[in-house]
Amino acid sequence: GAVVSQHPSRVICKSGTSVKIECRSLDFQATTMFWYRQFPKQSLMLMATSNEGSKATYEQGVEKDKFLINHASLTLSTLTVTSAHPEDSSFYICSATRAYNEKLFFGSGTQLSVL
Amino acid sequence: EDQVTQSPEALRLQEGESSSLNCSYTVSGLRGLFWYRQDPGKGPEFLFTLYSAGEEKEKERLKATLTKKESFLHITAPKPEDSATYLCAVQSTGANSKLTFGKGITLSVRP
């Protein structure tokens, strides 16, 4: 099956610092990658959709200047949480799809804790 | 707006005690309904995709079914290793692969 690798799995940082999370599709080229966040006992909430070489599309209410997404190649997307604050603490999960409207393959998630 | 409601929120079963998890949905046009399994601190793992009412899919002790309003995930003779959160998601037509997820059902299977 298709494998999506996400790093780091856990990060603790001080308030005001920036954190970068990487998402790689290891054995396929991902036409589209998605970034979700998940609070305890809550749904996965889509933050943004990114296509290689173009600007990400952000969901309503997601600050594009705070959550920077770069999709530089067909196998790599990054999410940078800029000037992180405690309210940004959450579980961030990336996913990728091989083709339009095919099922999503998920990374293992990143638990971000901002002190 | 697409909506997904899963019930119950949590389910505790004895090993071998079969049961069903419910996923009710409203969507303008259904392209697909997905079931995922999520272990604590991990990303979701794909289980099934169902595309049309009447469709059924099976994998080991799990069987997923679909009607025009809901989907069921039937678990037959569960084992402790089936303990996880089960997520249901819908994808509407023209959605460019965006999925709308339910909150999930946390299943605990006691030995």
Image (spheres, coloured by chain):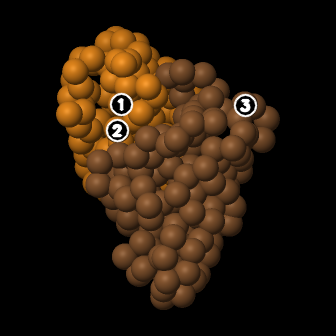
Chain colours: A brown, B orange
Percent of width and height locating residue B37: 51, 45
Residue pictured at 54% horizontal, 87% vertical: A14
Q: Is residue A113 left or right of residue B103?
A: right
Mark sitting on residue B46: none
Is residue B110 in sight in this rendering? no
**Residue A29 bears which disc, if any?**
3
* Residue that numbered label 2 is attached to: B100
* Residue in front for this viewpoint, B80 or A73: A73
Q: In what quadrant of the picture does the N terminus of chain B appear?
A: top left
Q: Position of residue B31 (x, y in %)?
A: 38, 18
Left or right of residue B56, residue A55 in this image: right
Q: Is residue A26 above or below residue A108?
A: above
How much space separates mark 2 and mark 1, taking CA atoms? 5 Å
Q: Are marks 3 and 2 on the same chain?
A: no
Could you tell me which residue is drawn at 44 percent across and 61 percent down? Answer: A65
Disc 2 is placed on an element classified as strand
Which amino acid type is marked by label 1?
Val
User: Dot 1 corresponds to which residue?
Assistant: B90
The amino acid type, in three-letter code, at marker 3 is Gln
In this rendering, is residue B30 above or below B6?
A: above
Residue drawn at 72 percent across, 31 percent down: A29
Q: CA distance from mark 1 to mark 3?
A: 24 Å
Q: Is residue B94 above or below residue A88?
A: above
Q: Which is closer to the viewer, label 3 or label 2?
A: 3
Q: Residue B85 at what x, y percent from top left?
A: 44, 52
* Residue at disc 3, secondary structure: loop
User: Pointers 2 and 1 in contact (CB under 8 A)?
Assistant: yes
Q: Residues within 10 Å of mark 2 (few under 14, many from 20)?
A: many
For numbered disc 1, what is the local secondary structure?
Answer: strand
The subunit letter for the residue under badge 3 reads: A
